[in-house]
Amino acid sequence: MRARLIIAVLWCLSWWPLSLQHRLGTLLGSWAARRAQLRMTQVSRINLALCLPQESAQRQQQLLEHSLQETGKTALELGTLWFSRPTGLHRLMQGSEGEHHMQAAVQQGRGVILLTPHLGAWEMAGLYASRHYKITSLYRPPKLQGLETMIKQGREKLGARLVPTDQAGIKALFQSLRRGEVVGILPDQVPSEAGTGVFAPFFEQPAYTMTLVARLARKTGAPVIFTYAERLAQGRGFKIHFLPAPQGIDSADLTEAATALNLGVMQCVNANLTQYQWSYKRFKVVPTGTTSPYD
């Protein structure tokens, strides 16, 4: 029943103008920012304090409220992104910046590893990529199984292929790269299995970081590109950004490679601090002998 209710709400929201969705998302985010007991508010405050200690308490509070407002927009715009027809989505794509980096990488013929952090409208970033490039993306099924069909159909409707985050999915990524295609990965997601990550600095904090990107890049020679969809003001749509990855992201030294990966994520985040998902428990896995900041 919970999954059906969520699907129904998102379908209804898909008929609203994006500007109205974003206004309601702003109100929800502002409400959450004033509820200190909410877990997402607590996690956001902890992450901002850890990652941006140089900012004043007032500035951190401003970032907290603005980021939760963006989180509200992220949730409410899903109906439009997943249920709208391709022509409707195309009208929301307000151009791109730095796409020549992506096009040059594709022309090398070795495939491209496209990394999309939890920044802005990452669902739109994936849809934009699938509209312009043949892409296979890693996919972690939702905890609420009743949502899986909706999510998969929404993400695949412009041509993307989703594969699970298991050995079969990893194999599919290698095969796609060897065919010269694009593979999509969320680079700031905490690895779910032991031994699939290393600790590397993220805003000077030790963060358990995936090694998959380095392994893919080294074995295939595929270049790595970062992308994110900036959410424009007043519901005007989204602007897609592409950035080349920092050097060393394909290093044989996995810690060096993970450090470069996190640097790339940070470069994206620093360009738009308020649209990063600070409510995600990025530091939930900690080095031995230390305690979780979220406890």
Image: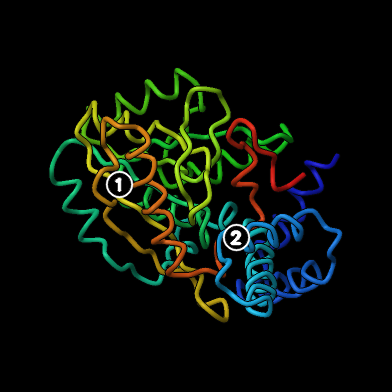
Image location (x, y in percent) of residue 184: 39, 41
Image location (x, y in percent) of residue 201: 46, 48
Badge 2 density bin: few <14, some 14–19, many ≥20, Cα 10 Å: many
Q: Which mark is residue 133?
A: 1
As helix, strand or loop, the secondary structure at mark 2 comes to helix
**37 to the left or right of 215:** right
Badge 1 density bin: few <14, some 14–19, many ≥20, Cα 10 Å: some
Residue at the front extreme of this rendering: 289
Q: Amino acid at mark 2?
A: Thr
Q: Which one is nearer the viewer's eye here, 143 or 285? A: 285
Q: Amino acid at mark 1?
A: Tyr
Q: Which one is nearer the viewer's eye here, 9 or 253? A: 253
Q: What separation in Å lies between label 2 and label 1 (alpha carbons)?
A: 21 Å
Residue at x-position 34% and y-position 47%: 260
Q: Is residue 77 above or below residue 204?
A: below
Residue at x-position 61% and y-position 32%: 141
As helix, strand or loop, the secondary structure at mark 1 comes to loop
* Quadrant (top left/top right/bottom left/bottom right) for the C terminus: top right
- Report which residue position mark 2 lands on: 80
Quarter holding residue 148: top right
First in sequence: mark 2 vs mark 1:
2
Residue at x-position 83% and y-position 58%: 38
Residue at the left extreme of this rendering: 108
**169 to the left or right of 46:** left
